[in-house]
Image (cartoon, coloured by chain):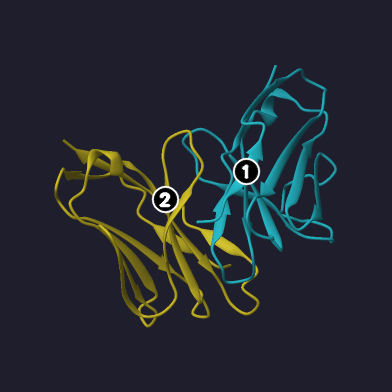
Chain colours: A cyan, B yellow
């Protein structure tokens, strides 16, 4: 399968600071990238969908001013958690796909802990 | 509301047995179907994709799709303890195939 790399794999930050997470498709061009959040023992929750060169589409209940998504190129999308708080601590996962109807491949995930 | 339903389990099978995982979906326009495996604390990993009715085999895994009945299943033959994980069904729905919808997953436990 194709390779999607996510960085960092874990991060600890202080409450009130911002954290940027990168998601790269290493061997293919991703027209669409998805960002998910997963709390312990719960299912994946889609946060937003981003297409290269356009604004991200956020799911209901996800604050777009708090979770900034940039999909500047066909191989890179970033998620910035602004003014992080302890309740933002979670496992954040990106996935990427070449085209509609094709498989989506996941990055390794980023475990964020806000203290 | 496009829905993907899975039995949350846990599904327990003895080592060497066949594990059968099922998924039903609500959107008749669905075209692409995927099974992902997620180990605890890790991100999902794609294990099978299926696009047309019938069976698709890959090693110990067989995906089965029945669009008329709106279900897709995953069979794991000769189950191993390393197969213990949560299995997620994912489906692209409708025209445009823009949104990938996941089920909540079935937790499989293979007992040595």
User: B7 above or below A5?
Assistant: below
10 Å crowding of disc 1: few (<14), some (14-19), many (20+): many
Q: Residue at x 69, y 23 (%)?
A: A86
Mark 2 — residue? B105
The chain that hosts pointer 2 is B
Residue to which mark 1 is pinned = A5
Q: Position of residue B81 (x, y in %)?
A: 24, 38
Q: Which one is in front in this view, the residue at disc 1 or the one at disc 2? A: 1
Tell me the quarter of the image containing the C terminus of chain A: top right
**Relative image position of residue B93 (x, y in whole percent):** 56, 72
Who's the residue at 63% across and 71% down the image? A100
Q: Secondary structure at mark 1?
A: strand
- Residue B3: x percent and y percent? 51, 64
Residue A81 location, quadrant: top right
Chain containing the residue with disc 1: A
Q: Nearer the viewer, residue B79 or A115?
A: B79
Marks 1, 2 in one chain: no
> Residue B105 location in percent, x, y?
42, 50
Give the vertical position of A35 relative to B32 (above or below).
above
Residue at x 46%, y 68% (from the top left corner): B33
Determine the secondary structure under disc 2. Answer: loop
What is the total number of numbered labels drawn onto the structure image?
A: 2
């Amino acid at each position: 399968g194709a390779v999607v790399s996510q960085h960092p794999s874990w991060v600890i930050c202080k409450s009130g600071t911002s954290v940027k997470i990168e998601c790269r498709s290493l061997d293919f061009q991703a027209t669409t990238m998805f960002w998910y959040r997963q709390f312990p023992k719960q299912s994946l929750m889609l946060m937003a969908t981003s297409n290269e060169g356009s604004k991200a589409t956020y799911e209901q209940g996800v604050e777009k001013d708090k979770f900034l998504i940039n999909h500047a190129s066909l191989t890179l999308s970033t998620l910035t958690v602004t003014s992080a708080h302890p309740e933002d601590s979670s496992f954040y996962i990106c996935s990427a796909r070449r085209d509609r109807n094709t498989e989506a491949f996941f990055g390794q995930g980023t475990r964020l802990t806000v203290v | 509301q496009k829905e993907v339903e899975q039995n949350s389990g846990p599904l327990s099978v003895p080592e060497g047995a066949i594990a059968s995982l099922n998924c039903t979906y609500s959107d008749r326009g669905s075209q692409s179907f995927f099974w992902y495996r997620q180990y605890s604390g890790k991100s999902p990993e794609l294990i099978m994709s299926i696009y047309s009715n019938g069976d698709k085999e890959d090693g110990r895994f067989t995906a089965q799709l029945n669009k008329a009945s709106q279900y897709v299943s995953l069979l794991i033959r000769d189950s191993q303890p390393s197969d213990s994980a949560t299995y997620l069904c994912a489906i692209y729905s409708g025209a445009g195939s823009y949104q990938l919808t996941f089920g909540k997953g079935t937790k499989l436990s293979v007992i040595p």
